[in-house]
Image (cartoon, helix red, strand yellow):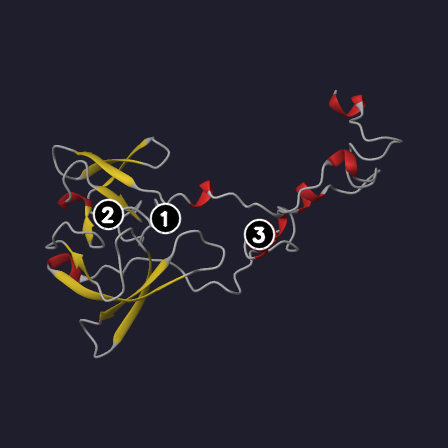
Amino acid sequence: MGRIILGSRKGKSLIFTAKTRLRKGSVKLRAVDYAERAGYVKGLIKNIIHDPGRGAPLCEVVFHDPYRFKLKKELWVAVEGAHTGQFVYCGSKVQLTIGNVLPLAKMPEGTVISMCEEKAADRGRIARASGTSCMVVGHSDDGCKTRIRLPSGTRKTVPSTCRAVVGIVAGGGRMDKPMLKAGNNFHKYKVKRNSWPKVRGCAKNPVEHPHGGGNHQHVAWMCLR
């Protein structure tokens, strides 16, 4: 009897863990509070950085704490057109500008958004990958629900109190550039996960895979029944 194959072992034990050592931090919107619900909060993009293991760039946004004399730094997914030194605003009384954070109820139909909340105050869950975006399709008659189109094309209904960033996530077209050589793939997956290179089953030993072994590489017909 052979061993459990590598693909089955990956999701079973603690041997394979996420490589988070070099990551810059968790990406979240600002925690919603009274200052944001009743008016707006002003922030400044201090820096745009690269996060290993993520395709989209991140931006460091600094806010003045409305209740304490200190600064608070948040990590957001950068949108196309954002730059260092740009002022961004979060709140219900904010203009519809690239980089600002508004509730979905304040956005007209056809607005392109990213980093949208799935539930109110969950700080952004939808459309965070590079080049992705959602679109506001419509609002309910009572103003409590908003229908959005996801990057996959499906439509989803979320509460109108959910917030989102106006704009498309930066880094679009990243997958169109070819890797060209194996060394680039090596460095790509070194910070992501242990999923490269992928060895064919028929090239392995009999103990490592049901297709392994034999005097020449072939898939045994008994395994396919």
Separation (CA) of disc 1 from disc 2? 15 Å
How many C-alpha atoms fall within 10 Å of the one at disc 3: few (<14), some, or many (≥20)? few
Q: Which residue is mark 2?
A: 162
* Residue lying at 57% horizontally and 45% vertically, measured from the top left: 180
**Side of 120 relative to 53 (left or right):** left
Helix, strand or loop under label 3: helix
Helix, strand or loop under label 2: loop
Q: Which residue is mark 1?
A: 128
As shown in the figure, which amino acid type bears the numbered disc 1?
Answer: Arg
Residue that extends furthest to the bottom in the rendered view of this protein: 69
Q: Which residue is mark 3?
A: 184
As shown in the figure, which amino acid type bears the numbered disc 2?
Answer: Cys
**Side of 81 relative to 23 (left or right):** left
Q: Return the x and y of residue 100 as percentages of the image width and height.
A: 20, 55
* Residue lying at 24% horizontally and 47% vertically, measured from the top left: 162
As shown in the figure, which amino acid type bears the numbered disc 3?
Answer: Asn
Separation (CA) of disc 3 from disc 2? 39 Å
Q: Which image quadrant is residue 87 in?
A: bottom left
The N terminus lies in quadrant? top right
